[in-house]
Image (cartoon, rainbow, N blue to C red):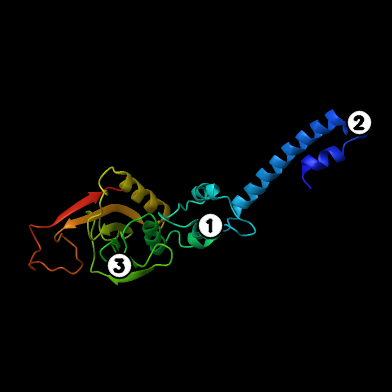
Amino acid sequence: MKYADYQPLSSPGWLQRKNGAAYQGALGTELDVAVDRIRQAVLASFPDAPGGVLATPADALDHIGADRLLPRIAGEAHAAYAERLRTAWDAWLLAGTYTGLLRALARAGFPTGATGMNIIQRTKRYAYLSGDGLTGTPVLLTHNGFDFDGTPRTVWNQFVVLFASDVSGLTVGSQLALALNNVVRLWKPAKARYMGAVVIVSGVVWGWPIGTQWGAAGNWGDGVSRFIPPT
C-alpha cells in the first residue's frame, strides 16, 4: 500500500474528514516520492541490467561510472555497462599493472595490437594488447635496453607508451592527449615513471621497430614521429 493511501487511514478520526484526508493524502504522496528516491539510490549502488529485479535507471549508469572511475566505452550497451559497474572490483584488481593499463587505454579508445599501443619499459620488456579492453591479454616481449633520457641504468623504473602507427587527433595539448595522460596516471604501477608517449607517424625511427640494426635499409632520413609529454 502506498503512503498516499495509508496516511489518511492511519490518521486520527478528526483528520479523516474531507480536508484532513486531502492533507494526509498529499503528505503521503511526498513520502512515496521520498521512498522512490531512496529505492533508486540503492539500485544505483548495485547496477543491474534492464528488466532485472534490481534494474538500474539508464540515466544513472554514467554517474555511477564516474564515481567508480570506469567510464562507458563508446557504443557499450546499457546491460554490458551495468554488469561491468556491478563487478567494478574485478576491473580494479588490475590497477597498478601494465595489463590493467593496456586494457584501460583500450577502453578509452586507443588502438590495440602490435601496430597500436605498446608499453616499453626501460628494463628489457615491452608489451601490446591482443584483444579488447575487457578481456584482452598482453603479448609480452623483450628488448636489449631502451633509454629515454640521460639517467644511468640504475634508474630502471621508466616506461613510455609507443604507438606503432599514427593516431588521428593525438597531438600535443589535444583532448586525446589529456585523456591518455589521465588514464596512464590512474592505472600505471605506482613505482613506474611515465616518460610520455611516442607516435610513429611514418618510416623507421631510432629504437623502433625493436631490433632494427644500424645500416639496415630505410633506417634514416624517412622516419617521422611525434612526442606527447606526460603533462
The numbered disc on residue 14 is: 2
**Amino acid at circle 3:** Arg
**Where residue 230 sits in the image (x, y, percent)?**
31, 48
**Where residue 42 sits in the image (x, y, percent)?**
64, 50
Residue at the image point whose x is 45% and y is 53% from the top: 72
**Amino acid at circle 1:** Ala
Q: Residue furthest right?
A: 13
**Amino acid at circle 2:** Trp
Quarter of the image with the C terminus is top left
Of badges 1 and 3, the one in the foreground is 1
Above or below, 184 against 126 in this view is above
Of callouts 2 and 3, which one flags the residue occurring earlier in the amino acid sequence?
A: 2
Question: Is 13 displayed left or right of 219 in the figure?
Answer: right
Q: CA distance from mark 1 to mark 2?
A: 49 Å
> Which is nearer the eye, 45 or 149?
45
Of badges 2 and 3, the one in the foreground is 2
The numbered disc on residue 1 is: none
How many residues crowd around disc 2 within 10 Å: few (fewer than 14), some, or many (20 or more)?
Answer: few
| Residue identifier under label 1 | 82
How many residues crowd around disc 3 within 10 Å: few (fewer than 14), some, or many (20 or more)?
Answer: some
**Where residue 41 sits in the image (x, y, percent)?**
63, 47
Q: Residue furthest front?
A: 18
Secondary structure under the numbered disc 3 in the rendered image: strand
Snapshot quadrant of residue 107:
bottom left
> Which is nearer the eye, 177 or 192?
177
Residue at the image point whose x is 77% and y is 45% from the top: 2
Of callouts 1 and 3, which one flags the residue occurring earlier in the amino acid sequence?
A: 1
How many residues crowd around disc 1 within 10 Å: few (fewer than 14), some, or many (20 or more)?
Answer: many
**Where residue 152 sits in the image (x, y, percent)?**
25, 58
Q: CA distance from mark 1 to mark 3?
A: 35 Å
| Residue identifier under label 3 | 125
